[in-house]
Amino acid sequence: MGALTPWKPRQELEKLQRNMEEMFERLSGRFFGHREENRSFWGGEPWSPAIESRTENGNLIVKADLPGIDPKEISISIAGDRLTVEGERKHEEKKEEKDYFYREVEYGKFSRTIPLPEGVNADQVKASYKNGVLEITMPTPQQTESKKVQVEVH
């Protein structure tokens, strides 16, 4: 399961940066003021959607939380043993001014790539979008089915 959730040190540094910025905002008395757009100090993507994967009934199922994103703006690609989901949550631009007291929703482009088991047939991949959740389903290759191995004690 560790291979499906690789450690991303840059993402951890960005999270630390956001936490420190929020702490300084509170200390400086700007807690209830307008917050500047989230921009990454380290460059790259400003946010990354949560993803989960599991096997069920001979299928690998990958889910991504993508609320507020038009499904027409989502791109799914498979290259070799990698599944990539890309898209963008666009900030609604309105001319009226709004005062935000607190905002955690992040906007901008994202890209998530996860490893797939060897032998996945890209022609059999299906995707659906419902209630802000993208679900990608594909048949699990035969060689990836689990097998119980008995440990011999000597």
Image (cartoon, helix red, strand yellow):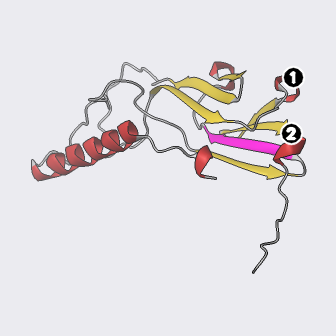
Secondary structure, mark 2, is: loop
Position of residue 78 relative to residue 24, above or below, is above
Q: Which quadrant, please, contains the C terminus? A: bottom right
| 92 on left or right of 53 | left
Question: What residue type is disc 1 on?
Answer: Asp
Q: Main secondary structure of the magenta part?
A: strand
Give the extent of the magenta segment.
59-65
Residue 49, position as x, y percentages in the image: 54, 38
Question: What residue type is disc 2 on?
Answer: Pro
Secondary structure, mark 1, is: helix
Q: How many labels were placed on the picture?
A: 2
The alpha-carbon separation of the residues under discs 2 and 1 comes to 13 Å
Furthest residue toward left: 28
Q: Which residue is mark 2?
A: 141
Residue 5, position as x, y percentages in the image: 56, 46
Question: Is residue 102 visible in this depiction of the protein?
Answer: yes
Position of residue 97 relative to residue 150, above or below, is above
Q: Which residue is mark 1?
A: 123
Q: Quadrant of residue 37?
A: top left
- On residue 107, the disc is none
* Marks 2 and 1 in Cβ contact (< 8 Å): no
The stretch drawn in magenta includes residue 62: yes
